[in-house]
Image (spheres, rainbow, N blue to C red):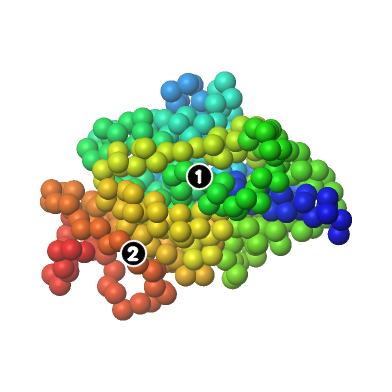
Amino acid sequence: MTRRRTAVVTAGIAAGAVAAGAVGAVVRRRRLEHHEHAPIGQLPPELLPSVRSFDGTEIVVRAAGDPAAPVLLFAHGFSLDLSTWSEQWPALSARFRCVLMDHRSHGASAAAADGDLTLRAMGRDIAAVLDAVAPDGPAVLVGHSMGAMSILALAELRPELFGPRIAGVVLIGAASGQLIRGAMGSVTELLRPRLGSLRAAAGRVDRLRRAVLASPADVGGVVARVTQFGPDAPRNVVDHVVALAGRASSQVWTDGLADLMEMDLRHALPRVTVPALVIVGEHDRVTPPAAAVELAGALPRGELTIVPGAGHIAMLERPEELNRAIDRFADRCLRDREQGTKPKARRRTRAGPPGGDEPGPAPPGRRRANERDSS
């Protein structure tokens, strides 16, 4: 392989890592219609009225579970859509009102008004959905990658929501800044000239992505596994995520990717005054465990869970472990909120295998007789 060709391939892999939830610059050629999904699960049964955000962008929202139950609001990652939570809402909607949103210019939501694909705009979208589905709270926000970073942007803009209406946050595959360094190190500089802009680099990533989509090459699944997944990710999960990233618009891959690479939200972390569970896959190469440790340590009430065997798409790779972690954390946040106490954060845990000896969580508002106060 020539030096030039090697550089192009390496840059493509680097772009996939930097994209914080994308699949990679090289994706499997997959001719799916806009409404089709690989068979990973059903969408939530309730299509709620679209939410009109601050700039008029229409946000599509679906839900499952008792409307009177505490809300879990899910925000997906870059170039994906709400279907990536297909393993969470069926398991959690028996006890919570699970609300899933498509970010602006993603999935079924409308294209961003005025082309605004910044994390701050997406944070304001989350606030608009929260106003619509849980105007008085309580709610726990669950975000993956770009969705998690949008929650941090929301804390920067609307810190007064954290506590009175937002009882806790779950940040999966997240970082608060310096995403390029954390994702792939100096190799990402192959994406741009020494004095070039990140926006120009993102444009080159998108052109490479579209060129490979138009080719007969069938290497997307391999590249996706290298950049996004743990070693045992199910084939249908890889195919589904690859298809979603391949369908994303060029504007998402240029403007949205550039904002992700430039973002630095470390100054917003002190404003996340509620319990915050940081979850990271053991094999996450996009937002590696070191970045998760740093993030959890910087949050006022942060704690960390590492999911063995998972990569960046942990909610689809290890759903049972993720569901248990979210369930227990949300239950604890809501229960302690009702009792007016501050839970003691567990700084680091590893999600155990399914069927462990630890008892499941009690329903919100009730404490097990043998449960320690520290939870």
Report the amino acid beneath label 1: Gln
- The residue sitting at 60% across, 38% down in the picture is 257
Q: Earlier in the sequence, mark 1 or mark 2?
A: 1
Q: Is residue 67 left or right of residue 115?
A: left
SS at mark 2?
Answer: strand
- The residue sitting at 48% across, 34% down in the picture is 119
Q: Is residue 25 left or right of residue 326?
A: right
| Callout in the foreground (1, 2) | 1
Q: Residue 133 location in percent, x, y? A: 35, 36
- The residue sitting at 14% across, 64% down in the picture is 373
Pointers 1 and 2 in contact (C-beta within 8 Å): no
Q: Quadrant of the C terminus?
A: bottom left
Instruction: Determine crowd level at label 2: few under 14, some 14-19, many 20+ residues with C-alpha closer than 10 A.
Output: some
- The residue sitting at 61% across, 32% down in the picture is 255
Q: Is residue 269 visible?
A: yes
Q: Residue 144 location in percent, x, y? A: 47, 49
Q: Which residue is mark 2?
A: 348
The front one of 18 and 337 is 18
Q: Residue 236 location in percent, x, y? A: 64, 62
Q: Residue 68 location in percent, x, y? A: 27, 44
When the figure is inspected, residue 373 is found, relative to residue 167, above or below; the finding is: below
Q: Is residue 67 visible?
A: no
Q: CA distance from mark 1 to mark 2?
A: 22 Å
When the figure is inspected, residue 357 is found, relative to residue 95, above or below; the finding is: below
The front one of 43 and 255 is 255
Q: Which residue is mark 1?
A: 178
The front one of 13 and 363 is 13
